[in-house]
Amino acid sequence: MTRLLQSDVERIAEEIGGYDEELLGKTGLTLRQIACRAAGISEKLLEQAAGRLPVAVIPVTAGQGVIPFFTQAVQAVVRHLGFAAAIPGGSDVVGLAEAVAEGARIIFLADDRKFIALNILSGVMADNNEATGRGFVTALNALAGGLRGKEVLVLGAGPVGMAAISHLVVLGARPAVLDTDPLKARFLELNGNLIVEHRLRPALAKYRYLVDATPRGNFIGVGDLHPEAFLAIPGMPPGLTPEAFAAFRDRVIHDPLQIGVATMLAMAVGKPESGGGDAGV
């Protein structure tokens, strides 16, 4: 998965309320509603779970180590959805043991390769890649007034992009995909019931609805896009240039963490078949 930077997450805790207001203004849905719809559970179920499933966010020092403010950002999103959320004093296995001993029932933890939420009562595991794909497609569906029957271009056929494609199918959209890896593109042509695009600029101009699930930043300019484009951008850094982001601001959904974490929590609360996913972007 893409490793976030301190600058990506350090203000999430203090800005989560304003972020949710902006999300509501654009989509007509709150972060809670997007997460529940993406996970396929009711808001009532999430509210009930908030009272009985305390959450812990475990600092993990493996690999490149803890990203400053990452655990606090995850904690802030979880608390914003009404759950009690603690960060143990210890890290890694010590932190996990401490969290369980203190009554945590949903555990968030991430290393360089995988970010999960684990419900230790039900055994449900929600993977950030799948949750992010589902959550951003749900938000795009609301932003666009529904995607059923509409063609949607997904940039990047990694785990987030493939999760987005799967959820687009669930919503009745017609997904297309573009990936810069020619072997992956060929595989999708032969094995997937998808439109496969091969040329970036013509594809960007053609599609009104776009999911950018790439880890590449600053490669989509204002003139590249359909003039009435609606965009969901889970990729970090965002693919839009600053000028393009400003021009399409009211029709762009983008954040580094919030939708993915909220959807992970809702998936971890839900039925066992609602969880899962693969690592890596």
Image: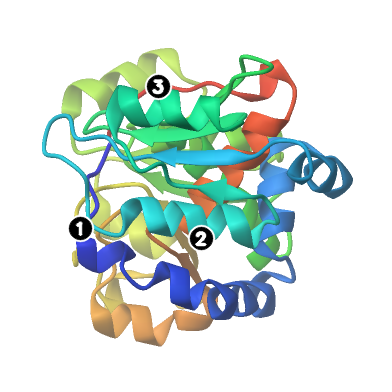
Q: Which sits in the foreground, 123 or 247?
A: 123
Task: For marks 3 and 1, give the one nearer the viewer.
Answer: 1
Q: Which sits in the foreground, 60 or 116?
A: 60
Helix, strand or loop at label 1? It is: loop
Residue under the image location 23 percent in, 57 percent down: 68
Q: CA distance from mark 2 to mark 1?
A: 17 Å
Please say whether residue 77 is visible from this viewpoint.
yes
Q: Is residue 208 left or right of residue 51?
A: left
The quadrant of the image that shows the N terminus is top left
Q: Earlier in the sequence, mark 3 or mark 1?
A: 1
Please say whether residue 126 is visible from this viewpoint.
no
Q: Residues within 10 Å of mark 1 (few under 14, many from 20)?
A: some
Helix, strand or loop at label 2? It is: helix
Q: Is residue 169 left or right of residue 76?
A: right
Q: Residue 15 at what x, y percent from top left?
A: 47, 77
Q: Earlier in the sequence, mark 2 or mark 1?
A: 1
Task: For marks 3 and 2, give the one nearer the viewer.
Answer: 2
Residue under the image location 37 percent in, 70 percent down: 225
Based on the displayed image, in which of its 4 quarters is residue 161 positioned? top left
The amino acid beneath tag 1 is Leu
Residue denoted by label 1: 5
Residue under the image location 71 percent in, 39 percent down: 172
The amino acid beneath tag 3 is Asp
Q: Earlier in the sequence, mark 3 or mark 2?
A: 2
Q: CA distance from mark 3 to mark 2?
A: 25 Å
Q: Residue 19 at what x, y percent from top left?
A: 54, 75
Q: Is residue 273 left or right of residue 8?
A: right
Q: Residues within 10 Å of mark 2 (few under 14, many from 20)?
A: many
Disc number for residue 278 = 3
Residue denoted by label 2: 76
Helix, strand or loop at label 3? It is: loop
